[in-house]
Image: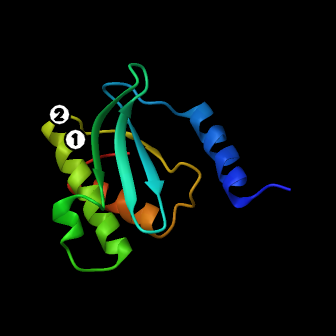
Amino acid sequence: MSTRTDRRQNIRFRIRKKISGTAQLPRLAVYRSNADIYVQLIDDTNGTTLASASSRDKDIKAQQGTKSEKSKLVGTVLANKATALGLTTCVFDRSGYLYHGRVKAVADGAREGGLQF
């Protein structure tokens, strides 16, 4: 009997077999909890996080709106940090979550901010 988290973990492992990030083409990893959303640009060859953003950051937490609207803001903030580092492209890692709702909002926000994937 597999639980929902076991199923997501298996999907996550299947995705991670196929994609990985480099310094020039980092992996945009998404973690979605019930209350918040966290995103990171990860260089898997060195095992380092290049940039990160979350809905718990002070400027985003102060905003009014739904969780999806805040997720879109998180995506644009991360895209701004990436362009400051000179990164324009990345690989999107949905971490086993459906590409729907808050995960899609992060992707849309990152695209509007200038990231390509």
Residue 56 image offset from top left, x and y in percent = 29, 60
> Which residue has dot 2 on it?
86
From the viewer's perspective, is residue 61 above or below residue 97? below
Q: In the rendered image, is residue 114 in sight?
A: no
Residue 15 in which image quadrant: top right
20 left or right of 106? right
Q: Furthest-bottom residue in view?
A: 65
- Residue 54 placement (x, y as % from top left): 31, 55
How is the model colour-coded? rainbow
Q: Residue at x 67, y 55 (%)?
A: 5
Q: Farthest left residue?
A: 84
- Name the element at disc 1: helix
Mark 1: give few (<14), some (14-19) or many (20+) Cα within 10 Å.
many
Q: Amino acid at mark 2?
A: Gly
Q: Does 28 appear above or below 31?
A: above
Foreground residue among 63 and 43: 63
Residue named by callout 1: 82
Kind of residue indicated by mark 1? Ala
